[in-house]
Image (cartoon, rainbow, N blue to C red):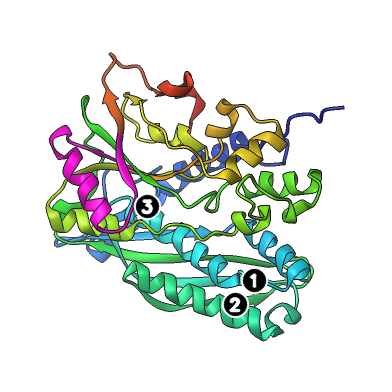
Amino acid sequence: MSQKPLTYHDAGVHYDVLDAFKRFCQANAGRTVGTLAAHGMREAAGTRGESCYLVETADEYVAHVEEALGTKILVADAVYAATGRSHYAAIAYDDVATIVNDLVSCGALPTVVAMYAAVGDNEYLADARRAADLAQGFADACARSGAAWGGGETQILKGMVTPGTAILGGSAVGRIAPKSLRVAGDVRGGDAIVCLASSGVHTNGLTLCRAVAERVEGGYAAPLDDGRAYGEALLDPSVIYVPFVAACQRAGITLRYCVHLTGHGWRKLMRLGAPFVYHVERLPEPQPVFRFLQRHAGLGDREAYGTFNMGVGWLAYVRPEDADRCVQTARAAGFDAWVAGEVRDEGGRKGVTLAPLGIEWGGDSLALR
């Protein structure tokens, strides 16, 4: 007997609830903006609802992001217990990646990153290998991002965090100087959509990934089509896209808007408030881990692409005349990149179209503001 399809909602993540809370917070946070004036600052226009918060000074923008890794660390814990192989350096790298990728989406280059770690008991960090690998991975990712690891906070939350587990998160600050380098969302019809490849699932959708491990024979040891173990593939470290944005800035390529493709999958292409249709003609073949997830969760393409990155971790909208140079710049910086489609002005309609799959989403499928 076939199993019932397993969606992200079924796995326990309800974006409608999370997004409603985010909108409630945005409305109330707006009441605090007046305090910035006493510091000689003001809130940058269009900041609310974006991945990165900006305040404007006379000379520059200062950026701030607070993020968390999510449940991917539970996969590392399970694989470590079963095989003795530590992936904690990659997990800490992931933690930094999810922070700085949000920060750089507005054009801010990170300057300082801080770690937050909460554990359920002392024993978790008493494992010297685990502790050393976490520290090494976090430092390596900060170096890749061009930022200093400035500090952080470590807590033992007995009774709140389950013993044998940890919560990883953190924050980053950065700057945009000169101010003209800001990615301000000045998107126009006809702009090109440039995609940069992901390394796999990155840090989004792991609650569903873990649920699949519970229903498939072999769990995290189950083989993918390429022979790798499912758990090992899930733990591939995320790509850090800071060097791409920095390279575009050096090359004088204007990034009109950037999307860090995480929660909400490909629907995230329409995060910008303006009404455009984001038409994609070229999609990559997803890594084997995604096809494994689709097969064992019973996910069709629409659900899969509406949840996971499916092989693309970053998108940039650029002027059509800059598209080829943007791709070349990305490749020179070590990224797999290509022109995937275009932004279309269709008379006020908002949506995303993945033409090769015949998938369309309307603007009502994403409500982050």
- Which residue is label 1 attached to? 118
Look at the numbered disc 2 and give the secondary structure of its residue: strand
| Front residue of this view, candidates 149 and 315 | 315
Residue stretch rendered in magenta on the structure: 315-339
Distance CA(mark 2)–CA(mark 1): 6 Å
Residue 334 lies in the magenta stretch:
yes
Where's residue 109, x and y in %?
28, 62
- Which label belongs to residue 154? 2
| Front residue of this view, candidates 329 and 314 | 329
Does label 3 or label 2 sit earlier along the sequence? 3
- Count of numbered circles on the image: 3
Q: Residue at x 14, y 52 (%)?
A: 180
- Which label belongs to residue 52? 3
What amino acid is at disc 2?
Thr
- Contact between labelled residues 1 and 2, with CB atoms less than 8 Å apart: yes
| Front residue of this view, candidates 282 and 12 | 282
What amino acid is at disc 1?
Ala
- Which label belongs to residue 340? none
Where's residue 255, x and y in %?
22, 45
Where's residue 176, x and y in %?
22, 59
Q: Residue at x 72, y 37 (%)?
A: 296
Distance CA(mark 3)–CA(mark 1): 24 Å
Q: Residue at x 23, y 56 (%)?
A: 332
What amino acid is at disc 3?
Cys
